[in-house]
Image (tube, grey):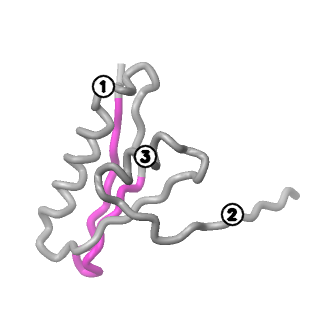
Amino acid sequence: MLQGYLYAEAEPGFAEGSVEFFGVNPIARGGGLGSALLAKGIQWLFSFQAIEEISLCVSSDNEKAIHLYKKIGFKVEQELIVFEKSI
């Protein structure tokens, strides 16, 4: 069974990379898998010499993910508001 995943994109032409998708199976949380996956993703992104910064988005109510991101050095850049309208 898949325990975790991370999908990252490198945009050396814009000097940036991003973590697009990241998740850990709830039964595998708390053992360091998320930190290890994220560390490898960051290492891969910064292996591109032109990459100067990495961004990611997270839901404001995902406190555990926010804690992890802050713990490894990410800082809040901005907060987004999402609008939705049903038809």
- Which circle marks residue 69 in the picture? none
Tell me which numbered mark, 3 or 2, is placed earlier along the sequence: 3
Tell me which numbered mark, 1 or 3, is placed earlier along the sequence: 1
Residue behind mark 3: 67
SS majority, magenta: strand
Q: Position of residue 71 (x, y in %)?
A: 33, 49
Q: Residue at x 36, y 56 (%)?
A: 19
Q: Amino acid at mark 1?
A: Gly
Whether residue 7 appears in magenta in the rendering, the answer is yes
Position of residue 28 in the picture relative to residue 78 (left or right): left
Q: Position of residue 58 (x, y in %)?
A: 51, 53
Q: CA distance from mark 1 to mark 2?
A: 32 Å
> Which region of the structure is painted magenta?
4-20
Position of residue 87 in the picture relative to residue 63 (left or right): right
Label 1 close to label 3 by CB (< 8 Å): no
Q: Amino acid at mark 3?
A: His
Residue behind mark 1: 31
Q: Nearer the viewer, residue 12 or 62?
A: 62
Q: Residue at x 25, y 78 (%)?
A: 15
Q: Residue at x 41, y 60 (%)?
A: 56
- Which circle marks residue 82 in the picture? 2
The kind of secondary structure element at disc 2 is loop
